[in-house]
Amino acid sequence: MTSTLSGALLALAPLLAQDATPEWAFPRGEAISVGIDPRALQQLDELVAGFVEDEEVVGCELLVIKEGKTILHSAHGWRDRDEGRPMEPGSLFCVRSMTKPLIGTSILMLVDDRALKLEDPVSRYLPVLDNDTWRDVTIEQMITHTSGLPYSLMVGRDHKQFSSIQDVAALGADYTPDFEAGTDIQYSDQGTDTLTAVIEKVSGMPAEEFVRTRILEPLGMDESRCLIGEDEPLLARAASKYLGGTAAWTRFWSPTEEPLFPCFLGSQGLYSTLEDYAGFLDFWMNRGKVNGERLLSARRVRKALKPGPHRLVQGTGFTQLRTEYGYLMTLHMLELEDGKDQLVSFGHSGSDGTHAWAFPEQDAMVLYFTQSRGNTTGLQVEEALGGLLLGDPYDPNVEAPPAEDYLGYYWEGENDLYRAIVREGSGIGLEILGKTVVPLQYVGDDTWKMMPNPSMRLAFHRSEDGVVEGYRIGEHQEYRFEPDPELPTVDEVVEQIVAVHGLDYLSRVGPIRVHATLEMPNAGITGTLEMTLASGGRFRAEYDMGEQFELIAYDGEKVSYASQVEGPLVLEGARAEQLKGDSFGVRLGDWRETSKGVEVIQRLEQDSGRKVLIVRCTSTEGYAKTRFIDETSGCLGAEYSINLVPGLGVLGDRLKMDDFREVSGMQLPHRITVEFATPLLGTMTLKVTEIELDVELEEGVFEIKGDPKKEG
């Protein structure tokens, strides 16, 4: 862990050695001299250091600039934990979506050049989009995420197949818009990459060359790269990339490996340091000027920092502000008493954990970079910045009442699908079935912040004798309840499941092998699943998705796993139990063998008159699998789960089974649909094509050893 002072000196050393420094080379200053309480600044640094200590991130770097002076520059944790390389000030990060504001700037520079207009159709510059679907979509609709293009069309594809940004833009040609252009908003990497292709066509040079010559070099951003080669000296300071979740981080890229992207992706390709990116923010703070020279008209700056036609809903830690979106720039707005809006902060974040905020009125900039993909600590930093810079009250740490006061089941009333208050780490969380678990942080008086969006509050209410009876979120009210003792018992439900689905066949006759096709349209993934099931809950699942694969096996004692990212390895704990419970055989067999705390929670009556039993397969001590059983047929029709997904963190999914067919006395579903809680994954559909009976098992089939690529 580097101290604030030594960190600042290390970061300034290379700048002091230069003959000429850019205007934004922010010299060291004292917090008190610019009106900042040093103790509050120290608390911010301790908050960030705590993220590393609690393993919420692998490493991080923090830079605070006020009135042009660096008042804090620190680093914590690891550049590469696997190799023992500590994080240091001046590290190089792939800033992912923080590339987008540079693409927005480039487009506006071309508008200033009168080389294009915002109202121009994109198809004027990209003939591949000159079709009935995309012909009239404009530059402005692309730059405001209102074009109808999806989040990404590259997910699930081998990035090496794209030799240029034109190839990426061409992916949209045959795509059916998610909505009519201009009528809605959807954050879109594909739209930004399409704009990057426009920059190339209009400027007559590669987009990375335009960004370098028109932005990076004039701004003195000497440690930023649109493309990074294997011989790039800056790689010596590059942070390796990690995915997973708290205390479960796995490295998926290091500087010794080949670059992630074969061409410059304007949606996510920039590599930069905190000070370099602060120079870009400073350029916008100075309304398009650097070193007294205007590079972008003030008119374009004003336009870019105004909210677009539709609100892009995002969480924020600023309790008094709401999040909007301008021209590829995230905006934080304050609603004034007269109903007008005031811009308080602008900047952007990146999916690998990088964040940058500029506060024009406070003449301040804050940059907080991690390399831990998908973490939400940036929202906690925002909450702290609200207190540090905006005078927002910062909730102190208050000792919470016992978690047992709150754990339990809640609903709006009978026939409403329940929610649960469950244990989340050392505290509690609100579980929304098949969606997510929202961590709660106590602020006093039975009121909890809903993390990672601390501006939302959940307030419990108690009876006269002090028992928690329910909670309220805004105007929404839920009431606590206990399952009706007249509901069928767990034993009765499980015995019916086993009798109907007949998977005791596996012990009577022998193993079966299920073959299925797999489709994930949002991710652009197609493939196959081959699953072998045997008695004792043993199974092996092989997902083949071209460049991607996943192998899962359970031999009755241990769960082994491998994918294109990690393995082979033996899993333990929650992740092992999760994968074991996801087995086809377990779902349709005796849950009592693999699940703890199974409980029949409620009975729902559907519009058709059918009655469905709701069974929770995990207590409120952990994340749930909730199963839906048709009370008449006894078939398991659906399962809502909360899982820890590597790279995405805690994520829900809603699985539905149908097209049940009789196979040698077994009732087996031939179609399974999984709706994931993130649009990035969308929906996965499995269609069974063949079921082999009494198959012969190869030795070691329920283990994964050796090279997983060869096994797959």
Image (tube, grey):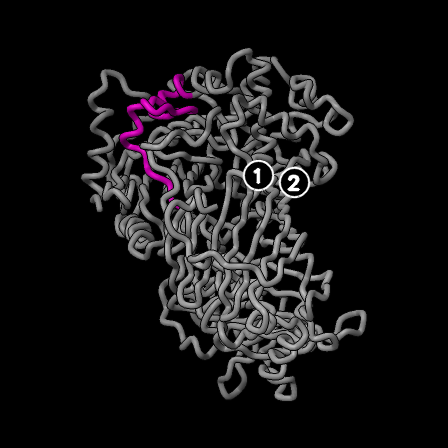
Tell me which residue sits at (68%, 26%) in the image. 138
Left or right of 360 on screen, residue 529:
right
Residue lying at the far right of the rendered structure: 608
The quarter holding residue 109 reads: top right
Residue 593 point in image, percent of width and height: 49, 75
Disc 1 is placed on an element classified as strand
Depth check, front residue: 283 or 665 = 665
Dominant SS type (magenta): loop
Residue 221 location in percent, x, y? Answer: 36, 23
First reached walking from the N terminus: tag 2 or tag 1: 2
**Real-space Cα distance between discs 2 and 1?**
10 Å
Q: Percent from the top left, x then y, of residue 507?
A: 55, 72
Of the pair 617 and 135, the residue shown nearer to us: 617
The boundaries of the magenta stretch are: 216-242
Label 2 with label 1: CB-CB less than 8 Å: yes
Q: Is label 2 in a helix, a strand or a loop?
A: loop
Rate crowding at label 1 as few (under 14), some (14 to 19) or many (20 or more) other CA atoms within 10 Å.
Answer: many
Q: In this view, does 690 lie to the left or right of 380?
A: right
Where, by quadrant of the figure, is residue 131 drawn?
top right
Q: Residue furthest top?
A: 204
* Image location (x, y in percent) of residue 650: 48, 57
Mark number for residue 185?
A: 2
Q: In which quarter of the image is residue 63?
A: top left
Q: Name the residue under label 1.
A: 325
Label number found at residue 123: none
